[in-house]
Every structure is written in C-alpha cells, then in structure tokens.
Image: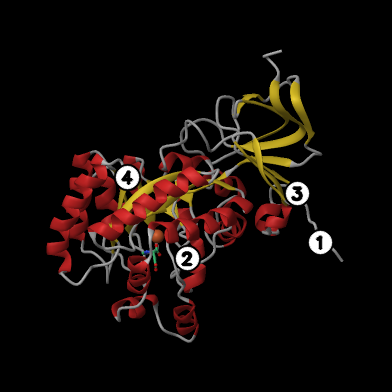
C-alpha cells in the first residue's frame, strides 16, 4: 500500500493564497488535505491515509512566514523601553551609544552556543504563534569576527529547529567607530568570505539618519549584487531620504519599513516589482507613524508583512497581533494581510515554490485555527485560537489547553 498518504486532515476549511508569485486574495473552500513525505499531495479528495484527522470545521491556513526578524541576539533592552515610555526617542538613544550598540556589546561577548540557545527560545515562541519559516539577520557584531559568529549561529539554529530559516547578512546595521568609509572596505572583505562559505543568501543595510548614508548603502548593495547576493534594505524608517526607490532600481527584492517613503517613489517600486515589507508592530512599539500601506497597494506595489522582532525597536512577534495592526492601522483587508504574511513573505525569502500556500507539491506547513471566520484573526488576535501547527506534515505544536484548576 505504498500509495497510502501519511496523513489526511478532512472536514476542514482551507484558506490560502495560490501560486508562487505575490497575492492579495485567498481561495477559501471546504476540503481535505492529504499529506505524504512532508508534502501536500491532494486537496480535493480525501486519499486513504495512515492517520486520519477530523478538522472539525476549523480553518487551515499556510504556516506564517516572517520575512524580517533580527534573531539571533542575546540580552534585553527594557531600560530603553521605559526611557522611551517616558519620552526619549529611538534615535536619541542610538546617538548616545545605546540602542543597537548596546546589543552589539552583549553579542560580541556571547559565544555561538549562547546565540543559538537564545535563538532556539525565540524560534519556539514563533512556532507556537504559527510561524513555520522565518528570516534571521546578523547585524549585532559590526566586525568580521562577530558578524560571522552570528551567521554561524543562524546555520546551527537551522539544523536544530523544525522551521525553515533564511540567513541575511546585515553587517551594515550601525556605523562603527572607524566611520563608514573604513568600514565599507572591511565589509567588502567580509562579504567575499560570507559568499565563499555560503553563510547568507541576502545582504541588507540600514540606510537612515543616524545609520548609513545613501552613498554607502548604494555602493554596498551594488557590490553585494555583483558578488551574487540578493539584496534588501531597511529604508526610510526614520527619514524620507529616497533610498527605497534607489534600492528598487538596483534590483533589491524588498525595501523594508518605509514609514517615510515619498509619493514619487511608489511607481518605481511598482515598476520594478520590489516588495514592500511592512512591520506595523515596530510602529506600535515605538509610537511612530505607520507605513502608507494603502497607498502602496493601491498603486500596484505588493506588500509582505514581518515582525521585525528584535530587542530594541520591537519585541512583538505574533502574526495574530501584527495582522490586527495591518488591518486596523495599515488599512489592509484581511485577505491582503494573510497573503502578506504567507505567500508574499515566502516570495521575498525566495521560498514561494516550497511554502506560503496550501497547494499540491508544497511543504505541508499548515496551521489549524478554531475560529468562526477569517475576520477573527485580527478581531480576536490571540494565539489561543491556534490549535495545531504542522511542519512538513508533522505535528510540531498542539494547544491542549491543559490548565489544572
Ligand atoms: O529594524 N532599524 C534598524 N534596525 C532594527 C532595530 C534593531 C535594534 O534596535 O536592535 C529595526 O527596527
Ligand atoms: Fe529590522
């Protein structure tokens, strides 16, 4: 009976974007998901399977894909949070040697194992919130040795957790004491090593006031592309310097944050099919403006969502809460927000042929939600509605609600 599926989830409402390219809408239908060897093999007919599971009318969605996190890191910055609550700004703290620099001091002292251990804890949190694929970045080393250490930790993390992990080199996260000019030379050397050792697929840069200049960022991304990296940028989070359009023109796969993006840049992103990765939890955490998502979407730009989970500017990581913010503050529709947190983020990470939708041939990364309608994701944004997480067809989390009273 080799044709037997491994698992069949029947009596389930499937809600998923379709295909391998960015989407704004979902297909919603009653079905049965048959899984074999970690992949989805049928959605239409319930194939005979070794295990049968009654979906009890629950919603099945693709596992969430977080397109932007700052895992791995160690330590915490709760004092900064309180200072901001009392009125200080993120930029002020960064300028005075806090912010990113304070996490750099801790990460430089940490071992690969320390970083992996901390990242494993965060990966567990993400899994329990339905995230089955996520991006990791370096960026808390700011020198060759400690940036490489972070990338090695990402590689090790990926062998120890069920989720797919995609690595990004963010050596240009904050300007080190030697200044941008000297650092650019050092980064170019590091990049060659990262490429040879295949430690990252993407290169990212923080181009903003208080971080790197446009000239530096442009040259870094241009050089990275030349070496064969895919490139992305933290662009126009704090200041409207026009870098989103510049990065788009050199072929960045995404430009991220975009709170201050100018109207005339939007057609450039649309024409080049550059994804806007928006992270409304950072706006919420820092009490800033939200990105102009509606303007982007209405002018033909595709949007992906991510957490930006990090110890300084945002500690929220739950797609449930972030979809709430996307609907309530970014004015995205529920279907746009779910597409943005699944297929579109998978597309940014170059994984949309494998994950991001519930379709035959894709990895069986599926979450089961006990909700009466999809509106309940933003309306009641608690992970308590998430009952089961499957990764490659294997049940990796179940919310058994085991309270003893
Ligand atoms: O995306 N904008 C720059 N980097 C992060 C913040 C990281 C940190 O503060 O540690 C961000 O918000
Ligand atoms: Fe970020």
Observer able to see residue 22: yes
From the top left corner, tell me how far across and down residue 77 is, in percent: 45, 75
Q: Quadrant of ligand 2?
A: bottom left
From the top left corner, tell me how far across and down residue 104 is, in percent: 33, 68
What mark, if any, has residue 282 been given in the picture? 2
Viewport quadrant of the N terminus = top right
Q: Secondary structure at mark 1?
A: loop
The answer to which of 250 and 295 lies nearer the viewer is: 250
Q: Earlier in the sequence, mark 2 or mark 4?
A: 4
Mark 3 lies on residue: 371
Q: Residue at x 67, y 14 (%)?
A: 2
Q: Residues within 10 Å of mark 4 (few under 14, many from 20)?
A: many
Q: Is residue 257 left or right of residue 204?
A: right
What mark, if any, has residue 199 been given in the picture? 4
Label 4, label 1: how far apart the Cα atoms are? 43 Å
Q: Earlier in the sequence, mark 4 or mark 3?
A: 4
Q: Is residue 258 left or right of residue 120?
A: left
What mark, if any, has residue 403 been given in the picture? 1
Q: Is residue 387 left or right of residue 93?
A: right
């Amino acid at each position: 009976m080799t044709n037997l599926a491994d698992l069949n989830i029947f009596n389930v409402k499937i809600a998923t974007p379709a295909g391998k390219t960015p989407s704004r809408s979902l297909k919603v239908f009653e079905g049965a998901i048959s899984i074999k060897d970690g992949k989805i093999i049928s959605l239409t007919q319930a194939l005979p399977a070794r295990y049968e599971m009654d979906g009890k009318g629950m919603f099945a969605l693709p596992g969430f894909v977080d397109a932007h996190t700052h895992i791995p890191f160690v330590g915490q910055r709760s004092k900064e949070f309180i200072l901001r609550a009392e009125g200080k700004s993120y930029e002020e703290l960064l300028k005075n040697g806090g912010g990113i620099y304070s996490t750099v001091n801790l990460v430089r002292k940490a071992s690969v194992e320390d970083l992996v251990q901390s990242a494993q804890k965060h990966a567990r949190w993400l899994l329990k919130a339905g995230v089955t694929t996520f991006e990791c970045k370096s960026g808390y080393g700011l020198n060759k040795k400690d940036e490489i250490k972070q990338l090695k930790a990402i590689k090790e993390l990926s062998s120890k957790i069920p989720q797919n992990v995609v690595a990004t080199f963010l050596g240009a996260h904050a300007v080190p004491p030697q200044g941008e000019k000297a650092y650019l030379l050092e980064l170019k050397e590091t990049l060659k090593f990262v490429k040879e050792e295949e430690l990252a697929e993407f290169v990212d840069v923080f181009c903003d006031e208080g971080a790197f200049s446009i000239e530096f960022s442009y040259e870094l991304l241009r050089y990275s592309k030349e070496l064969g990296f895919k490139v992305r940028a933290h662009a126009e989070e704090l200041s409207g310097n026009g870098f989103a359009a510049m990065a788009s023109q050199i072929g960045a796969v995404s430009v991220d944050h975009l709170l201050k993006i100018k109207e005339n840049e939007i057609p450039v992103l649309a024409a080049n099919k550059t994804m806007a990765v928006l992270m409304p939890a950072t706006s919420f955490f820092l009490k800033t403006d939200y990105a102009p998502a509606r303007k982007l979407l209405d002018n033909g730009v595709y949007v992906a969502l991510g957490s930006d989970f990090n110890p300084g500017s945002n500690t929220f990581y739950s797609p449930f809460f972030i979809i709430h913010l996307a609907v309530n503050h970014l004015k995205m529709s529920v279907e746009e927000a779910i597409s943005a947190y699944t297929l579109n983020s998978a597309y940014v990470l170059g994984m949309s042929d494998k994950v991001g939708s519930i379709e035959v041939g894709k990895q069986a990364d599926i979450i089961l939600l006990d909700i009466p309608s999809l509106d309940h994701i933003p309306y009641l944004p608690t992970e308590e509605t998430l009952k089961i997480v499957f990764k490659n067809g294997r049940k990796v989390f179940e919310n058994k609600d085991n309270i003893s009273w």
